[in-house]
Image (cartoon, grey):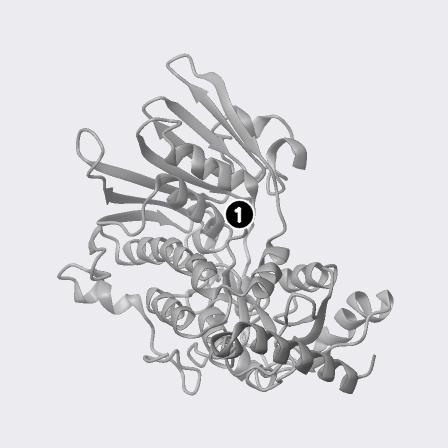
Amino acid sequence: MGKDDRLTRRRFVKQSAGATLGGAAAGLWGTSSAWAGANDRVRVAVIGIRGMGQSHISNYAALKNVEVAALCDVDENLFAERVKKHFTDKGRREPKLYTDVRKLLEDKDIDAVAVVTPNHWHSLAAIWAIQAGKHVSVEKPCCHNFFEGQQLVKAAKKYKVIVQDGAEQRSNPCAQSMAKFLADGGLGEVYLAKGLCYKWRKTIGHTPDEPVPAGVNYDLWLGPAPKRPFSRNRFHYNWHWNWDYGNGDMGNQGAHEMDVARWGLGVKLPTRVCAMGGHFMFDDDQNTPNTLMAVYEFGNEKGGGDKKKILQFETRHWISNREDGMWMTGNTDEKTGYMISAGNTVGNLFYGSKGYMAKSVSKWQTYMGQKRQPGPTGSGLANHYQNYINAIRQADPVEFNKSIEEGFYSCALIHLGNISYRLGRSLDFDPARQRFINDDEANAMLRRDYRKPFVVPEKV
């Protein structure tokens, strides 16, 4: 089928849907002319093709009637290998290639994008894509700071496109059954949730400032961040450990476990946060903590005693205990989940009046009563990528886009904890106003100064 034939088919499906569902449906998809109906191909562009970007490419390409039609990355050195590995070697049509996300978003043949950039680009790229009429899946954390998350939620509510948050455990039956069990009172009053992020992280050492490598558009890579010389420890992957671009491990791996902890505890924004930790053992270029303990307090009118709930999050980078027998049963996917490997312990614990629960990616187990007898359990994985495509075809953004607001609340805890850590003191927070109470210094850290023209807009 040639390009003209594809466009004719796409126009036919769009016109048919408009005739059947009326004017409201005809305007559902914003400015994009490449509407993807239930019987039409969804054309996806992946923005950021290193690391997790390759997972997005391979997973979307494996779905029925989905085409990875474009790739975008500021490092042109990646294109040849990615195209060969994921396209030509597999007999797939080569994608269009872009270095500037703004040029990609002008392509009317693209239905949906996956934002798999460094954190400091997540919200801006997502908001631009939403405004361009594209469906958006944005990797975790969905925002680099609190303000960006607020703006992303506003954009998702305003424009009639699908917006998926990157907290992929939300798609898993394991996490869904966990949340239902806790909400239904399976553990009684759940008063404490813990997020565990114990991952071996070695030193990144020191790297000097140096000329920008050939083929890298470094100005585009910096985007909203301050202008700084190029250094390899502020570039591929190690950007995670620099405040200008990343959010430390609580905002990296920990974004998943923070989301599960908040979900299971049944809370949104806290009234108080206190975090402390540090960058231990190593003298290197990292400026985020490798060990961090953050504690959040939430109101709980229906609870006993002090009428509150607590969420505790721990990031550890080195030798750690396993916390529960669930993480001692082996390193296979079937037993403990895909992130339990090489000495890592990643998951959640919940404590209630009837017992406690341990949860990994693929399984949860309860221990009931004073004798901690094994109780109800749950498991199950699903396809987060298919969930996104299904949502596009089902065309209910008002309902589906509630997920990005949930993603913002979880990311908000990460940002509030990091602010407490960086200021070195506990902070009181007003969940209704979404501001710190009588604290200009802390409130100033809810957002950043943006480098023009890469500015997260005040009005979306």
Residue at 32% over, 45% down? 267
Which residue is the extreme one toward the left?
A: 438
- Where is residue 5 shown, x and y percent of the image? 78, 83
The N terminus: image quadrant: bottom right
Residue at 51% over, 41% down? 175
The C terminus: image quadrant: bottom left
- Where is residue 172 shown, x and y percent of the image? 56, 45
| Res 287 seen here | no
Q: Quadrant of residue 351?
A: top left
As drawn, 203 above or below 350: below
Does residue 44 appear left or right of residue 364 in this picture?
right
Residue at 65% over, 69% down? 49
Query: Looking at the picture, which amino acid does disc 1 mark?
Result: Gln
| Res 440 seen here | yes
Q: Residue tagged by mark 1?
A: 169
Does residue 137 appear left or right of residue 9 in this picture?
left
As drawn, 435 above or below 363: below
As drawn, 96 above or below 393: below
- Where is residue 55 shown, x and y percent of the image? 67, 59
Front one among 361 and 78:
361
Does residue 430 appear left or right of residue 381 in this picture?
left
Residue at 16% over, 62% down? 439
Front one among 269 and 44:
44
- Where is residue 391 shown, x and y percent of the image? 56, 61
Front one among 444 and 347:
347
SS category of the residue bearing label 1: helix
